[in-house]
Image (cartoon, rainbow, N blue to C red):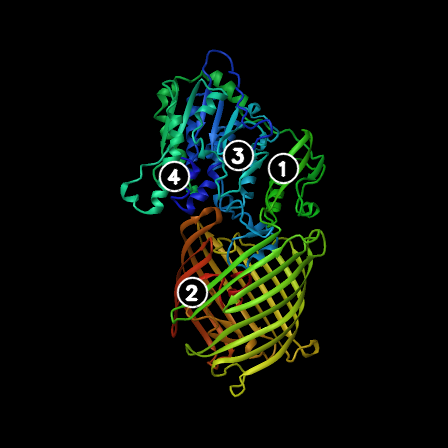
Amino acid sequence: MTMVRRLVGSKFRSLACGLFACLALLPEASGAMDQSTVAAPGGQRPRIGLVLAGGGAKGGAHVGVLKVLEEQRIQIDCIAGTSMGALIGAGYAAGLPAADLERFVVGIDWDAVVGGAGRRPQEPIEQKRLQMAASTDLELGLQHGHIVTPGGLSNTSGIDDLLRTYVAKARTVADFNQLPIPYRAVATDMVTGKMVVLDRGDLATAMRASMAIPGAFSPVVWDKFILTDGGQVRNIPVDVARQTCADVVIVVNLVEPETPPEKLVQSTQLLARSMDVMLQANEDVQLATLTERDVRIDVPMGDIGTADFPRVPETIPLGEAAARKAVEQLARYSVPPSEYMAWRQRVTVKQDVEARVAAVRFEGSNRVNAEYLRTLTSIRPGDVVNIEDISADAMRMSALDDVDAVSYRLEGDPANPDLVWLPEESSVGPNVLRPSLGMYAGGSGDIKFLLGAQYVRHWINDRGGQWRSHVQVGYESLLTTSFYQPIDVAQRYFVEPALFGVRSVEDVYVDNERIAVYRFADLGGNIDFGVNLGRTSQVRVGYINTRRRAEVQTGISQLPEIDARLPEIDTRDAGLMASAMYDSRERATFARHGMAVEVQYLQSDESLGGDRDWSRIEAGLRRAVPFGNNAMWVGVAGGTDLGDDLPGDRAFSLGGPKTLAAYRFDELRASGYWLADVSFLWRLVDLVPVKNQAIYGGFGLQAAGLYDRVDRVEDGEVYAASAYLGGSTPIGTFTIGIGASEDSWAFWLSLGRPVGSGSILDQGIFR
């Protein structure tokens, strides 16, 4: 079954399936549509063509079939494959025996490759920080007055890297007739809607073309062709194998159980089935051409779907079992042991000859400064060609927001080749728009929302300057604009001046009762100087000047600065600020491993332009510890004033789903606090594996101490517990849950970026 087949039916899950299900070949100008025939190896033995169907995760069954073909001493003369069949077929054609294929396929971290979990650790730290200001993963482009969407849901850097490592020993082969076993892959040209047979070019890029499920992965563009998943036109390419070499074909067909009538009542189910019917038509046409001489191996896949990549190891025994049922048919084409051994030795991949890089070049980079890209790479002229190092360099470059994917080629003298990098710049840049959405609804009728957008203009100059603006309305309305300017080519040092205006509404509670609502208005500016320390750490220092106005909107005054008889203040805070952050998480939300640390220092001083003197410091740490697909989170945080004069409007606040879940946002206020929490997270359902989007269930325990409380409640410790259901979706994260303590409880529903200030664990990099 083709990768596309369950695209709608399994909803977003099939997109992920599609991700890897369609792996094909990028041709050179002379290669597309060239179906030149490979000569028979001699003798009277019929030439055997192997046909491997597409099927996403189900395609792992092809490895099991290959194991049986080797046991039966079946000599393969050519291979034609689609989607996952193209992937498995390319490895076998490039000289990897079935045992090596099995180790490779089983050893893949599908979460990192398909879901993109391996990309974020390679992202620059400033890029991670900027992304946390938006509540969704959605990126839109603004080009010539029009909104532009990405070519695919998923960044393909992890897949590109996997494919190049997979066929590394065949990196110099441009004509697929010259592979140990002649090879063909099938893709679909989206311009004409017709099949393109790929027989030459870069093997890894070619596989990527065959895997490109429309909407899930960006297509592969070559000359006049826009190449996507070949399963749309030829999921079982029998005719391609015959035109390539085959007198006899061995066809591996991945069979799903029939859909029961009771599951064909909803519109989504019917739409999914309609796509199955349409796609099955091209399979039936090909299967109808089989003769008595051919061998058809039907592999029942049970309940394994195209997106079930963690279950790939389960598919290999299914392929073995199905192939063994066809042993009598296969035996007709067995060759003597000595003949098979000679062939096996001839087609098995040989050890690489050591080669050294003669030169390193970058081609195709228009906006992104190639010299900046060079600072991200480690390979220099004179270095030994090492696929692992090349892959690591490619991953660092493709992790940039400005780059969709990075390929490369080795050209010239095989002993001293030139390494040519081919970065593919972002299809939505340089003007990028990220929508923001935040909503919180508490059980007491407390509803807050945020709606906004972040705009970033990339690469204003050759140092990578960015103009950044953020507009937001709702519970916290704001308008900010800044100019982020790296100072050096490597973007290690930077300066960022900014202007901002913020209007917010904050509640004050005493004994679980809201007694006042304050309205704040801040207008000011700041300038930061900073240094990026690798991809995980950043330090900033700067000056901030803010005019603050506040008034009691409803209720009575509780904040010390605001007298109930004159419920207004107009003051200026000006002074120094400093922050440091560390972020090694593999994903921004619902992380399974990694750690985030943040420290913030704020000061206002009359000598620096402020109307009042105060200072405070706050720090937080959250670490994710994995166990399988699940995780445990451990977090600690604390803050204190650095004197006895912290104004009430600058006090710390606790409460909300990410801190003390039994309390509402900002319910607890104090001049000093400590907080500890531990949460357990279970991954329940995958939604869009290509984006690491899933639904989780969990529970947490929290403890906190509050001192010098602003709300005139006695100091002391509080404890809370929570249970929740949450997840990451195309429109942002969501949680629904309940929290309880000895004297309080809260129900909440949140969507997108958390609403409210909270502790440091409820803001910044911890969102």
Q: Which residue is mark 4?
A: 275
Q: Earlier in the sequence, mark 2 or mark 1?
A: 1
Q: Are marks 1 and 4 in contact (CB under 8 Å)?
A: no
The residue mark sitting in front, 4 or 2, is 4
Instruction: Please name the amino acid that badge 2 sits on.
Output: Leu
Asked if residue 758 shows in the view, the reply is no
Q: Are marks 2 and 1 in contact (CB under 8 Å)?
A: no
Crowding at label 4, few (<14), some or many (≥20) Cα neighbours within 10 Å? some
Instruction: Please name the amino acid that badge 3 sits on.
Output: Met
Rendering coords of residue 471 (x, y %): 56, 63
Spatial distance from mark 2 to mark 3, Cα to Cα?
48 Å
Q: Residue at x 55, y 56 (%)?
A: 434
The residue mark sitting in front, 2 or 3, is 3
Spatial distance from mark 3 to mark 1, Cα to Cα?
15 Å
Q: Earlier in the sequence, mark 3 or mark 4?
A: 3
Q: Which residue is mark 1?
A: 408
SS at badge 3:
helix
Spatial distance from mark 1 to mark 4, Cα to Cα?
36 Å
The residue mark sitting in front, 3 or 4, is 4
Crowding at label 3, few (<14), some or many (≥20) Cα neighbours within 10 Å? many
Spatial distance from mark 2 to mark 1, Cα to Cα?
49 Å
Q: Which residue is mark 3?
A: 207
Rendering coords of residue 108 (x, y %): 49, 40
